[in-house]
Image (tube, rainbow, N blue to C red):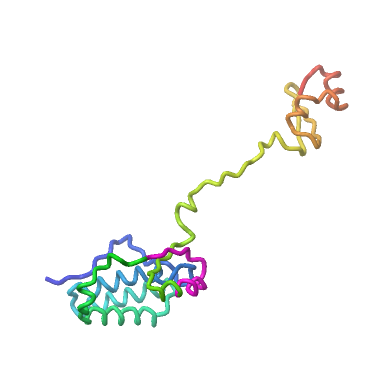
Amino acid sequence: MEIDTYRKPTTTDTTISYLSNHPLEQKLAAYRFLIDRMLNLPLHKNRLTNEWQTILHIAKNSHFPTALIHNLRHRMTQKRTQFPSPTQLTNPRKNEKWATFTFTSPNIRKVTNLFKQAGIKIAFRGTNTLARLVKTRNATRTPPHNTPGIYQLKCNICNLSYIGQTSRTYKLVTTNTSGTLKTTTHNLHTHNTY
């Protein structure tokens, strides 16, 4: 029996693009997962090679430099072969301090390096969240009949229309058209109303 990596037929090779404004840690998260799975599964040599080529293909489609992915694999392989130090085994990670920053540009690293030097771990939050994209904007819109502009009045009986312009709101124009000469003339001759 041989083990292989299964991908659904609907699987896409889409990851966060290398060109996007995300922290590098978030961009590499998918590749860390794929490489970790590849290294942990007891794959036959040719299946391991195929999986590695698939990972490189996904990275290429997302505009990642292949050297970056090769370097990530190398670091992860080295980490697997190193034995944990006695301090890593005895020190639980309960007292770690974390700070969260909104990632606006790579320049934020200058600020976060100060925190890292103080022993505070850093987590980044993106600005383009789903909640932000879905949130409705509460823009106060004026109803169209409460604004000045060009209007058209249509006779209910003969379908003649009168087009005018006003600096008042449409509500005032439609309720007070008797002062307009053309509409008054039409009303007198036909006894129709707009």
Which of the 4 image quarters holds residue 82? bottom left
Picture quadrant of residue 83: bottom left
Q: Number of labelled discs?
A: 0
Tell me the residue at 17%/74% (across/down). Answer: 42
The answer to whether 9 appears left or right of 182 in the picture is left
Is residue 40 magenta-colored? no
x, y (%) of residue 181? 88, 26
Q: Nearer the viewer, residue 91 or 165?
A: 91
Question: In which quadrant is the C terminus drawn?
Answer: top right
Q: Quadrant of residue 138?
A: top right
Residue 126: x, y in percent?
A: 46, 62
Percent from the top left, x then y, of residue 172? 76, 28
Q: Is residue 143 above or below residue 7?
A: above
Query: In the picture provided, is 75 more to the left or to the right than 62?
Result: left
Task: Quarter of the image for the N terminus: give it.
Answer: bottom left
Camera-side residue: 53 or 186?
53
Residue range (magenta): 98-113
Against 190, residue 61 (above or below) is below
Where does residue 168 sit, x and y in percent of width and height?
Answer: 79, 34
- Residue at 38% in and 65% down: 98
Farthest-out residue, left: 1
